[in-house]
Amino acid sequence: MGTLINRVVLTVSLALVLAGTTPPTYGATSKPTSSPTSKPTSKTVPTPTAKTTSKTSPLPKTSVAPTKKPAVKKVIKPKKKIVYKKRNVKITPSKSPAWPPKSFEGWKSVDDVYWKTSISQKEQNGILSDLRQKTFFSEQMKDKTCTKFACGVIALAATDGCRWWQIDSVLSRPTSATDPTPIVIGSIRTLLSSTKARERATVWLVSTEPLKFSDDTFTKVTDIYCNHMPSTEKLNTNTYTSVSAQ
């Protein structure tokens, strides 16, 4: 009885000893390493602060689309209109030629009828350029008909005027280069309309006789009629008749 009690005590004591010791481990075990402990230092780590610099960061480049310039229209300045002041110019009418026509100017007369056949080319040009001059057949001179065909010229006037005129003339040429005797080669009959009293008129006597180089063809007036009765024929005509056609 007494022995049993001691065993129980021993068992309990053993249990207590076992409880105070670390139970054994089986198998390979790694040696326990001591974990390093960080030693406190007196240095303080400065906190990073953002440094400001004097340099300015460049602004980002922005691309700007080129703008088209508006089309400039050329303005044409109107020319300054020049205004000419009208001057009141007093026009004095040319004096009427003296009457009667002077003989020293080449005029001839029978009764109250006057005529002139010696009219230079310069005088004819002056008459053609003067619109105030009364003329007959001047268009044949202007279109140079009389540079191709034989023509004559005469100036006429009458104191009381004429209702119509008739002029007869002949065309002549020298017989030969060595014989100057004139030979009649044709005739011209010219009929004209009226002229007023003391009115002068220049008449070209136009033929259809062709001119030649160095031609000495000339016109000679043979008769002049100043008529006061009405005409039964067509007026303002030149009718040429060659000798060969007679």
Image: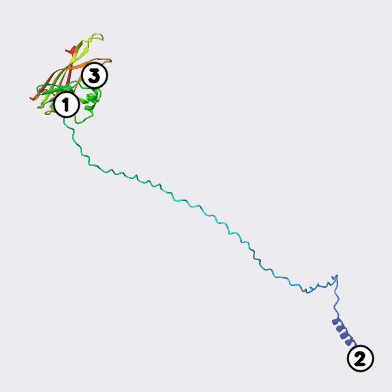
Q: Is residue 232 visible from the viewing direction of this image?
A: no
Q: Tell me the SS state at disc 3.
A: strand
Find the distance from the CA under tag 1 to the CA under tag 2: 204 Å
Q: Tell me the SS state at disc 2.
A: helix
Furthest residue to the front? 104
Mark 2 = which residue? 2
The answer to which image quadrant residue 83 occupies is top left
Q: What is the x, y in percent for residue 19?
A: 84, 82
**Type of the residue with mark 1:** Ala
Furthest residue to the top? 178
Mark 1 = which residue? 201
Other-residue count near label 3 (Cα within 10 Å), few / some / many at <14 / 14–19 / ≥20 = some
Quarter that holds the C terminus: top left
Q: In the image shown, does 26 or 216 lie closer to the viewer? A: 216
Mark 3 or mark 1, which has the lower sequence index? 3
**Type of the residue with mark 2:** Gly
Instruction: Name which residue lies at 88% across and 85% down.
Output: 13
Q: What is the x, y in percent for residue 220?
A: 18, 17
Q: In the image shown, does 108 or 212 lie closer to the viewer? A: 108
Mark 3 or mark 2, which has the lower sequence index? 2
Residue 59 position (above or below residue 194): below
Residue 29 position (above or below residue 155): below
Find the distance from the CA under tag 3 to the CA under tag 1: 22 Å
Q: Tell me the SS state at disc 1.
A: strand
Furthest residue to the bottom? 2
Other-residue count near label 2 (Cα within 10 Å), few / some / many at <14 / 14–19 / ≥20 = few
Mark 1 or mark 2, which has the lower sequence index? 2
| Cβ–Cβ under 8 Å for marks 3 and 2 | no
User: Which numbered dot is residue 149?
Assistant: 3
Q: In the rendered view, does 130 fall on the left or right side of 41?
A: left
